[in-house]
Image: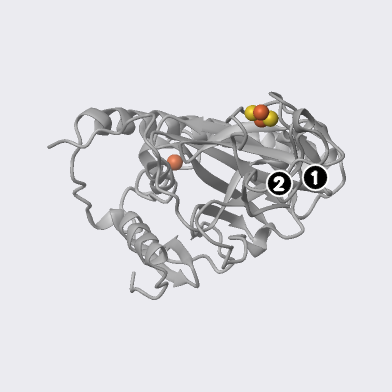
Amino acid sequence: MSILRSPVALSPLEPGWWVVAPAAQVPKDHAVTITRFGRPMVLWRSGGRIQAAWDGCPHRGATFDGARVRDGQLICPFHSFAFDRDGACTAMPCEGPDAPRRGLELRTLPSRDDDGLVWVWVAEGQPTETLPWFPDLDGGYPADFVETFEAPWDLVIETMLDYAHLPTVHAGSIGTKMPMAMKVEQRRTERGLVMWNAPAAENGSGELYWEAPASWQLKIVPKVVNAAFFVPIDAARTFVVFRFSQAFVRVPGLGDLIGWLANLYNRKVVEEDRRVIEGMARTLAVLPQTDRLVAADAPIAHFRRARTAWMRGAGSEDA
Ligand code: FES
Ligand SMILES: [Fe+2]
């Protein structure tokens, strides 16, 4: 029996903080909807923060896409019911001011907007973790760009952790002059992995990091990094926020120019990856196969084991 990946299938809701959008994507006075984990999600600003809920009005199921936000209240575009930042219904204009409003609640999600990113805890229960963040990003001057891949999110992140493809796929960019034979070493972090091609550089240059569930970082040198935050749009598509960050030039204008130039190059590298990732997704969608990992694929095996341990909530399984 073959397993086909369907573009409409729901991805499982993995526990953890996921970056679902750049904060700049959420306007001040109206809501936006996005699809994540195969489900529509609404984001709006209230009380100086970005709030998140699964989309759909509890009255008749209308979408909140483009809904007005008035004094931090989300106003349904269908019958103007209002909802506060906690998702409670505060007004049902068609019923008059005294109608009971119990049971009319949005399906809100714990959310944060830190460091210019919208983080959402999508799984059951309240967050039990801090944000999966990297200290090398602290104090950095960020430059972001976003991409959508026609591929499942774990396939995308596995490719970003794959050292062995660098001299082939990126022969004209980051992989130029890299030897084909590599010796990748790794160690577990509290809830993730760090990997490097031996021998390790003293300053950590070239180290690759993964923090559960879907944060990634390549250290160029300390405080100059490329990071990426992955999230499933659905079972077959992935949204990624890429961030270049450097902590040396923080002057607006000049810092932006450096980030823009770095991301010109980074976009070229991402396009090199896209051809491989989306091609792989197309073949696997119709001709599923079991991976035959070789020794150089150790980072992928490490990632899968670490992810499984994370999903089990163990966090201690040997990788
Ligand atoms: S569907 Fe939202 S107020 Fe009626
Ligand atoms: Fe790559």
Q: Which residue is mark 1?
A: 46
Residue at 35% across, 62% down? 308
* Number of residues whose C-alpha sits closer than 10 Å to that of mark 2, classed few (under 14), some (14–19) or many (20 or more): many
Which quadrant would residue 75 be assigned to in this image?
Answer: top right
Q: Which residue is mark 2?
A: 51
Where disc 2 sits, the SS reads strand
Residue 2 pos. (x, y %) = 16, 35
Looking at the picture, tell me which residue is in the foreground, 190 or 83: 83
In this picture, residue 319 sits left or right of residue 37:
left
Residue 9 pos. (x, y %) = 36, 35
How far separated are the C-alphas under marks 2 and 1?
7 Å
On residue 12, which mark appears?
none
Tell me if I can see residue 269 in this picture.
Answer: yes
Within the displayed image, which quadrant is ligand 1 positioned in?
top right
Looking at the picture, tell me which residue is in the foreground, 197 or 286: 286
**Mark 1: which amino acid?**
Ser
Tell me if I can see residue 176 in this picture.
Answer: no
Where disc 1 sits, the SS reads strand
Where the N terminus falls, by quadrant?
A: top left
Asked if disc 2 and disc 1 are in contact, CB closer than 8 Å, the reply is: yes
